[in-house]
Amino acid sequence: MIRVKIAGTGSYLPERVVTNDELAERLPKTSDEWIFSHTGIRSRHIAADDESASSMGLIAAQRAMESAGIGPDDLGMIIVSTSTPDYAPTPLTSCVIQDKLGAKNAAAFDMSAACCGFIYNLEIAKNFFSNPNFRRPILLIGSEVMSRKVDWDDHKTCILFGDGAGAAVLTASDDESGIVDSMMKADGAGGKHLTLEGGCRSSDSLHHPLAHVLQMGGTQVYSFAVKALAEVANELAERNGLTFDDVKRIIPHQANYRIICSAADRLKLPEEKFYINVERVANTASASIPIALDEMNRGGLLNRGDKLLLAGFGAGLTYGGNYLVW
């Protein structure tokens, strides 16, 4: 079977940075110390009024393609994960980006698994390469404008999220580098703990009083997330004959510093085994892991042959991970 690798990465963070101190000015129950102690977050990037999932995703995509050394005509497919699409539901954000890129040879579709979307899409995209008639590069994008889906008067949720985009180009590998294994799981029974009303569930759903505002059961989601991260890392390591000493880094979804640390404790691993950037960017949903990958790639933290575990979780509830060799 053909091995499929990440050949290039890219990311984009909006220019505007909102600090905890700025939030505390409008949220009397908070302070920089309170937010940081509960989340590990100091700041987050917030999209400008004219920025969107497609505009941010486009920049991340262009940077990933430059990193991979390919042009728009080379692409065979574009897959976008977003919980904050430009339109609801059409045209697809992937199609908007395809047009802006001028990628006339590329198929395009959106596939969202909430914050776990990039992990799901890595495995989905990899399998297209098993078709001998389809061997062109695939562009994966996670792009989110979560600042437009939170209640900025709710101090328990708005402090958690930021905006941004991450992207990766997948190509066939000619060596041992590539995606070795993936796991994708869901716990639909827990979906009620992380909701965003405003769909077509019933005739009055569009007019729900909480339409388009994220609602989260913090305690339930926290417990699920810690368990999910530990389960994913353990299962991927065990079924691939790895010890955690073999793994260069675990790259988790950057939702909350305390979640990552609690998962590390369950796994009996030092914090340093995990790549963590949540302090600077907060929770960027499905853009979280590709942004982290791009930071590591451009920062010289990844070397050929490094074994990496990606682990995430999200609304749905979804969770999963990937084992890849860089």
Image (cartoon, rainbow, N blue to C red):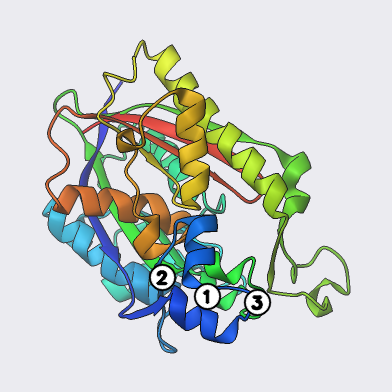
Q: Are marks 1 and 2 in contact (CB under 8 Å)?
A: yes
Q: On the image, which quarter does residue 201 sit in?
A: bottom right
Q: Residue at x 72, y 60 (%)?
A: 195
Q: On the image, which quarter does residue 73 sit in?
A: bottom left
Q: Which of disc 2 and disc 1 is earlier in sequence? A: 2
Dot 1 alpha-carbon crowd within 10 angstroms: few under 14, some 14 to 19, many 20 or more: many
Residue position for label 3:
151
Residue position for label 2:
44
- Quote the CA–CA distance across marks 1 and 2: 10 Å
Q: Secondary structure at mark 3?
A: loop
Q: Residue at x 46, y 49 (%)?
A: 257
Q: Is residue 91 visible to the viewer in this orientation of the structure?
A: no
Residue nearest the viewer, comparing 58 with 218: 218
Residue nearest the viewer, comparing 260 with 121: 260
Q: Residue at x 74, y 52 (%)?
A: 193
Left or right, 13 with respect to 228, comes to: left
Q: Where residue 147 is drawn, which disc sits there?
A: 1
**Amino acid at circle 3:** Asp
Left or right, 141 with respect to 85, comes to: left
Rendered view: 250 above or below 31: above
Q: Secondary structure at mark 2?
A: strand
